Amino acid sequence: MDLRPAATALLEGEARALLTRLNRVTPFALHETMVPAASPSAAAQSAIERFLMEGRARLRGRVGAYLEWLDGPGGERDPEWQQHQFSLLRWEFNSVLTHFDLFQEAVTQRSERDVGVQLAGLDVAAVDALTTPGTPLADPPPIVCYLARGPGGAIRRVHTRIPGGGRSPVSLIRIPRERMVGYGIGASLVHEVGHQAVAQLGLLGSLRPVLYDIERHARTAAERTAFRYWGLTLSEVLADLFAVGKLGIGGTLGLMAVVSLPRRLVLAPALDDPHPFPYIRVRLSCALGDALYPHPQWGELSALWATLYPPHRAPRELRRLTGILEGSMPRFVRLLAGHRPPSLSGARLADLMPRSSHTPALLLSRYRRWVRRPALLRTAPPTLVFAVLGQARAASLITPEEESRLLGELIAHWALSSTLDALAFRGAGLHRYAAPPRGATSHDGAADKRQPIAAHPAERSALDSR
């Protein structure tokens, strides 16, 4: 019995059903109900929408070609081959939905009362933290922040691979809800931004060979152990360096808040964890801070951390590892601060940081001036605000309640100011980091005798206008 006609009819119906489901996925701009101040930047919205629309258009074209094939030579092929071709379409269809879901959580949160505006303000702060004139960081990619449960922050960097295939058109930063308090906000945000900076500057590629060379030529087993460990955790160490370099002691205090866990977790390294274990991570942050902004506060904070988590309570092997790592810290810190990656054209890594304006004394002086003239707060860059308030908190000049209130107001102010600026300069064009067109063409459905299943009219117009 010839089952080819039945198989062809079945698969044709399934393919048209895919198109129907695909066309129910509309651009975020047509169904999200966020207020203007909560919106991601125009560059981020454009990059995300075009990335998703191009994926849907590409799939639409493939389904249309498959239906044409079934109506022609494919109808004569073996049902197993027809099914194989359809399964590939189904796989790509699931990838398109995966891409939509990846960004939906971040975009949908912008419709939540208060939360959306706070996230938009964090977008502005993230761009400010990353932007460094005269370096490859002078023109940052679009950044979109969102909240998530759990203690861990994360970043999906621009142009990195994403589930379902393709590369992310924006940097997507996940901030744990628990960290939306005081200096924890800035520390978490700037740490994740640091990962984007590390990638754009190529720091892992320039530093890992140096660490490997030290390990290979180490004169002692302790030195070899230390620099092997620093090499394994280098990515997170550099992000911590970026946070403390941009925020001063607020970066370290925020880190302490994140890793204040039960003692067995703070004093126990995990073999598969790219982060230094919490005890040594905070001690290293203090050492980095002291190298960039010398002041007795770093030694005092480091000693306080050792009092909160006495290292002598750890098992003997861990005490030995802790001693080895602490003994290697001065050399490691000098190596990081003095590193001259090719991307900085001879400048040191320490030169990326605002060292002349972010000393503890200057930050406190600026805070006292802001107390006298509160309006100055609203004109200061977000990263400077985080640094000043963190230093004031460390000096007990501001209460946690007042710090949280001020930050809440300022983050909303950054979102509103950015929105008004964007409206004033509407039509400036797409950000250069937006994912490039992939050459996909838009198809309106199957080329058969029946009425084609069209894309959403607004989506079709957007693609046609490129």
Image (tube, rainbow, N blue to C red):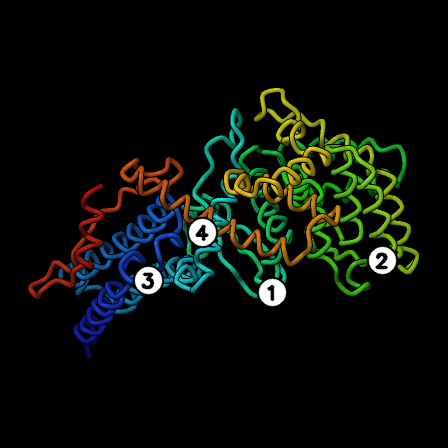
* Apparent side of residue 140 relative to residue 298 in the rendered image (left or right): left
In front: label 1 or label 3: 3
SS at badge 2:
loop
**Of residues 208 and 187, the one drawn nearer to the viewer in this rendering:** 187
Q: Name the residue that disc number 1 marks.
A: 150
Question: CB of mark 4 within 8 Å of CB of mark 2?
Answer: no
- Mark 4 vs mark 1: which is more N-terminal? 4
**Of residues 416 and 226, the one drawn nearer to the viewer in this rendering:** 416
Tell me where residue 310 appears, x and y as whole percent.
Answer: 89, 57
Tell me where residue 191 appears, x and y as whole percent.
Answer: 62, 46
Q: Name the residue that disc number 4 marks.
A: 120
**Of residues 444 and 122, the one drawn nearer to the viewer in this rendering:** 122
> How far is mark 3 from mark 4, CA to CA?
14 Å
Given the image, on which type of amino acid does mark 1 rest?
A: Gly
From what the image shows, is residue 249 above or below residue 211? below
Q: Name the residue that disc number 2 marks.
A: 309
The residue shown at (74%, 43%) is 285
> How far is mark 1 from mark 3, CA to CA?
26 Å
Question: CB of mark 3 within 8 Å of CB of mark 4?
Answer: no
Asked if one can make out residue 161 in the rendered structure from this viewpoint, the answer is no
* Apparent side of residue 251 relative to residue 379 in the rendered image (left or right): right
Q: What is the quadrant of the N terminus in the image?
A: bottom left
Q: Name the residue that disc number 3 marks.
A: 33
Q: What is the quadrant of the C terminus in the image?
A: top left
> How far is mark 4 from mark 1, CA to CA?
21 Å
From what the image shows, is residue 206 above or below residue 347? below
The residue shown at (55%, 42%) is 377
> How far is mark 2 from mark 3, CA to CA?
47 Å
SS at badge 1:
loop
